[in-house]
Amino acid sequence: MLVFAIVSILVAVYFLYQVIGNVSSLNKKTPLLLQLDAYDTRTITNNPLTESTAKNMDTLQDMIDQNVSTQKDIRIYSKYLAELQIPYTYFLQYVYLPSLNIWKDIYTKQISIDLIGMKFLQKNPYDDIKLLQKRSDFFKSVGDNNESNDIKNIDIGDIKEEANGYFTIPITVDFLANSKRAFLLLVDKISVTSNKTNISLINEFWYYLWQEIKKDKQKEIATLTTKYASLTGLNATKDQDKVIAYNIYNWIYNDKENALIDKSVIDKTIKNIISCEGKSDEVCYYQFRDKYKNIPSFGYFIGTDFTSDPAQNFKKFMLNLPPIFSLKSFTFNKEKPASYSDTTTAKYAGTIRIDVYGRGISQGEIDEISEVLGESCFKEKTKLSLEKAQEVVSLTTTKLSNLERIDKSQSDNLREIKNTLSEIKKTYEGISPYKKTIKLFEIFRTLQDGGLCK
């Protein structure tokens, strides 16, 4: 036992010595473990996104420092990108891509349930007659009182809602430009929102305008914030950008007060875009007009010496700004003059095909509307649907049949409502979200007029 104990101790001492030696050896190699050469770095050296930075990294600390620096850059650029998108997020998206959901206020998010019947026909911008009138006026008027185009024919196709949440309206126009100037003005007009460069120029102006409003109109913004504080859904006290957008939108499209855009704001916006430090107004405005020469209805109208009210000029431009559309085809021919001696008058006949874009109605929006209609009709938190309406009619009919005396007029009325709902059901599942929304309001009005709402 004594021999065994001695041997065991010697073995333990040996292994302890080995462990100490290995630990010491590893400690000496620790600096080498900080070198990237000790690892398989093919993942970052072969990746196009990290290949260039990997060449400048030798240690793990270099990699950590690079990651910290990258995260910092991401935060800076994310903040900058968010600021660039503010005018679009809060305002321009509703101009470029108007929504089919005309019942929901874009800022307060309130749903109007009284937009039915004659009121719907009067205020619905997607009504066939309104679309024909608006698009005819768009191609006819070229922003010059002395020039205009004749619209020979206009064909507006059905609204087509896409799976991506947007819709298109195909439009074909046959026109006759009565002069070369009218023709060129039309070409300029249709390029405003069908050309990416022009859209970028408008976005740039709005970015600097928004910054200038925030800088110069803090007092006015504070007053508007107090004024809008009671509006449900606007969150005026928490979101300054919504306050700005709400005031501008209502000023341009609803003829409400203008508290934020004036001559001074537009003047400073122009000078910020061009970087006009140390330059005269004449030079500054000239450079602005040159920058926006592809949008003459904007550049020359806004970037003048302000002989007229620049804020009203700006409003007029925005009112005439069409939604985003793609130009499918544009063909034209120069018309022969009535006589060979007539060399001053040139007319151009052509055909334009475009697809106008906008935002469709989502299933979530349909659910919101059905909830509001259901609560309004039944005075309880329930969704209005075709099935729910049929159920109400069926229950009411059963209740009437149990009475000793049946009111014939009421019975006939229920039968008519039942037939109306049956007709709607035949095509309801196959129609677009926009038409489903219209049908929901028709169902609501049918129940309301039939005395089936509480």
Image (cartoon, grey):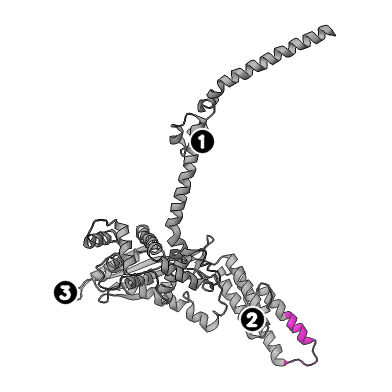
Residue that carries the numbered disc 2 in the rendered image: 420
User: Which sits earlier in the primary sequence, circle 1 or circle 2?
Assistant: 1
Residue that carries the numbered disc 1 in the rendered image: 64
User: Is residue 445 among what the camera can see?
Assistant: yes
Q: Nearer the viewer, mark 1 or mark 2?
A: 1
Q: Could you tell me the amino acid type at mark 1?
A: Ile
Q: Name which residue lies at 56% across and 65% down.
A: 362
Q: Name which residue lies at 51% across and 73% down.
A: 102
Q: Could you tell me the amino acid type at mark 2?
A: Thr
Lateral position of residue 376 relative to residue 144, left or right: right
Instruction: From the top left corner, tell me how far across and down residue 197 is, in percent.
Output: 35, 57
Q: What stretch is highlighted in magenta?
A: 394-407
Residue that carries the numbered disc 3 in the rendered image: 342
Instruction: From the top left corner, tell me how far across and down residue 381 is, in percent.
Output: 68, 73
Instruction: From the top left corner, tell me how far across and down residue 179 is, in percent.
Output: 24, 72
Between 6 and 317, the one nearer to me in the picture? 6
User: Which sits earlier in the primary sequence, circle 2 or circle 3?
Assistant: 3
User: Which sits earlier in the primary sequence, circle 3 or circle 1?
Assistant: 1
Relative vertical location of residue 289 with respect to residue 26 in this rendering, above or below: below
Q: What element carries label 2?
A: helix
Find the residue positioned furthest to the left.
Answer: 341
- Tell me how far mark 3 sits from mark 1, CA to CA: 78 Å
Tell me if label 2 and label 3 are in contact, CB under 8 Å.
no
Instruction: From the top left corner, tell me how far across and down residue 161 is, in percent.
Output: 52, 65
